Image: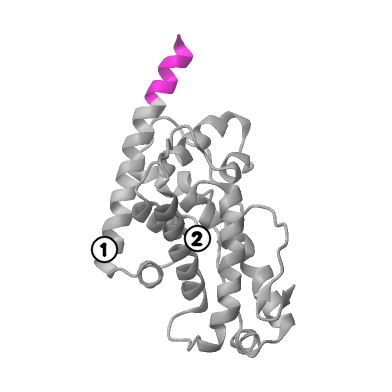
Amino acid sequence: MVRDGGVESRPAPAARGDCGAASPSLTSRDHDRLMVRKGKRYTVEQPSPKVVRKAAQGEESALDSLVRSYYRPIQGYLERIVGDVSDAQDLTQEVFLRMARGLPRFEGKAKFTSWLFQIAKNLGIDHLRRREIQRDPLQRVSEEAASAPVPEHGFEEHALLWSCIEALDVDLRSAVVLRDVYGFSYKEIAEIVGATLATVKWRIYQAREQVHAAYRAQAGIESSRRKV
């Protein structure tokens, strides 16, 4: 429910960016199959211009429609950025408060979803800077990621993959999640993160390379432990 330009707090289940099971012999060619199970990648659709226009005019049902449509993707993205489900929920509420306040000034020069995710990205980065989070990514896997439905035989590999993604620098992590989980184009990601197209491509390349290397290294360790 949206009231007086704000968003009423509501519980919402965590977003599910499903990932497929992986084998320890991960290669770059396996990347798309590993990152997101085929057919399960988020598709972040654009809202109708009519809904956005009515929401900008303060129509409650239109604002509520936008919140319902984008709450889960935004919360899931923020969980990946800040690494904490509770913090991500709080930040998600703030995203939609800012959305409601900013819509009257939204001119449509960028896609609505790019604009909304840019709000989320800025809040997530600011949150990390304020808290100066010192993270141990290989021990902290997002609750949402760990709970995503995967075959039992692939659960360890699934959790390991996300722990490797969590280990990335926040700029690399944000770019690769926007691309490989939410399916944004390189151009849209550039708009969201405020970087050049070349920088975005470099970040995604570096993120994938680092994830592949970390995954292979950790998978080898886990495999050795199971043999002991």
Query: Which residue matches tag 1?
Result: 199
Residue at image position (52%, 56%) is: 78
Image location of residue 23, percent across then percent down = 45, 32
Count of marks, rendered view: 2
Residue at image position (39%, 54%) is: 129
Prevailing secondary structure class for the magenta stretch in the rendered image: helix
Query: Which residue matches tag 2?
Result: 182
Dot 2 crowding, Cα within 10 Å, few <14, some 14–19, many 20+: some
Asked where in the image residue 187 lies, by quadrant, the reply is: bottom left
Residue at image position (59%, 87%) is: 49
* Amino acid residing under circle 1: Thr
Q: Is residue 39 visible?
A: no
Image location of residue 65, percent across then percent down = 69, 75
Image location of residue 87, percent across then percent down = 56, 52
Please give the range of residues in magenta: 220-228
Q: Earlier in the sequence, mark 1 or mark 2?
A: 2
Front of the two marks 1 and 2: 1
Q: Helix, strand or loop at disc 2?
A: loop
191 horizontally vs 85: left or right:
left
* Amino acid residing under circle 2: Tyr
- Residue at the extreme top: 228
Label annotation for residue 64: none
Up-down relation of residue 177 to residue 61 (above or below)? above
Image location of residue 38, percent across then percent down = 53, 52
Nearer the observer, 227 or 176? 176
The answer for how far apart the CA atoms under marks 1 and 2 are is 19 Å
Instruction: Say if the magenta span includes residue 213.
Output: no
